[in-house]
């Protein structure tokens, strides 16, 4: 099993590959199979692994962050937005340069659904003269591109601060917008992504062993039925 590799943005996501040599006989069988079958077997397994990573990240985040009082307005106040943004995806083989590689990742996403309670938590502390601030992806109505300077709460921008912590920032004037901002107290690190990686690495061999034979059998049976119908044959 290959080690996980951190993304270029610390804590924003985790990219990982699966070295199937950890399960006896799997590597040799997959090498002998056509690429199409290998991909169909490994992609759903990778989806399970990535989803497991996102679930572990949410669990460790909720366990590690302090439950601060309502009157303390800090980035680590538990609004639930960061937890809601944690998700997973598998990159389609059609978008991979190396068609033999199945890539999965999990972490803070731009596209995510915000629960009703989380929206209420945000509305209670985030006020703006023009109305409630947005959450997650905000698209420009003209270009259709993501507006990352809209002021919307986008956890992918600060997840590394939660993971690594940060120094105190005195009050001042923003160089970009010219607006004043409040002093930000120092925060210790809450390495929930590192904890989730450790737990996921321990769980991957079990996921592979439990799903490999089932997935391979299902894909093989599906392809047999498909080609049998094309040939006019009958499969019981």
Image: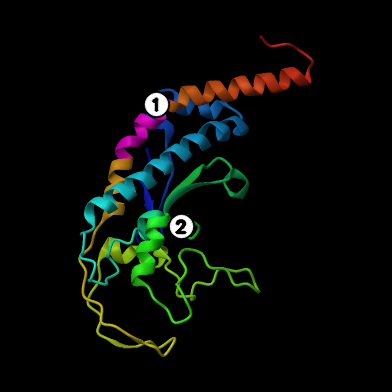
Residue tagged 1: 209
- Residue 19 image point, x, y percent: 42, 37
Going by the image, does 172 lie left or right of 20?
A: left
Q: Is residue 99 magenta?
A: no
> In percent of the image, x 51 and y 35: which residue is there?
44
- Relative depth, front residue between 233 and 19: 233
First along the sequence among labels 1 and 2: 2
Tell me the magenta residue range: 201-210
Q: The residue tagged with tag 1: helix, strand or loop? A: helix
Can residue 132 be seen here? yes
- Residue 60 image point, x, y percent: 27, 49
Quadrant of the drawing holding the N terminus: top left
> In percent of the image, x 45 and y 75: which residue is there?
151
Going by the image, does 60 lie left or right of 6?
A: left
Tell me how many marks there are: 2
Q: Dot 1: within a 10 Å radius of its alpha carbon, few (fewer than 14), some, or many (20 or more) residues?
A: some
- Residue 235 image point, x, y percent: 69, 11
Q: Main secondary structure of the magenta part?
A: helix
Q: Is residue 211 above or below residue 204?
A: above
Can residue 9 be seen here? no
């Amino acid at each position: 099993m290959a080690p996980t590799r951190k993304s270029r943005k610390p804590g924003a996501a985790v990219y990982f590959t699966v070295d199937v040599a950890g399960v006896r006989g799997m590597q040799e069988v997959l090498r002998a199979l056509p690429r199409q079958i290998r991909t169909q077997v490994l992609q759903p397994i990778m989806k399970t692994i990535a989803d497991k990573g996102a679930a572990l990240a949410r669990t460790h985040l909720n366990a590690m962050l302090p439950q601060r009082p309502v009157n303390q307005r800090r980035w680590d106040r538990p609004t639930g937005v960061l937890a809601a943004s944690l998700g997973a995806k598998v990159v389609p083989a059609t978008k991979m340069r190396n068609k033999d590689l199945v890539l999965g990742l999990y972490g803070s996403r731009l596209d995510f659904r915000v629960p009703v309670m989380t929206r209420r938590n945000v509305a209670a502390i985030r006020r703006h003269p023009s109305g409630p601030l947005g959450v997650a992806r905000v698209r420009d109505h003209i270009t259709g591109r993501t507006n990352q300077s809209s002021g919307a709460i986008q956890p992918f921008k600060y997840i590394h601060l939660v993971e690594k912590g940060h120094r105190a920032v005195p009050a001042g004037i923003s160089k970009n917008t010219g607006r004043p901002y409040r002093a930000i107290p120092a925060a210790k690190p809450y390495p929930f992504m590192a904890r989730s990686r450790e737990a996921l690495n321990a769980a991957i061999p079990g996921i592979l062993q439990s799903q490999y034979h089932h997935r391979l059998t299902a894909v093989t049976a599906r392809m047999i039925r498909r080609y049998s119908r094309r040939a006019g044959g009958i499969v019981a």
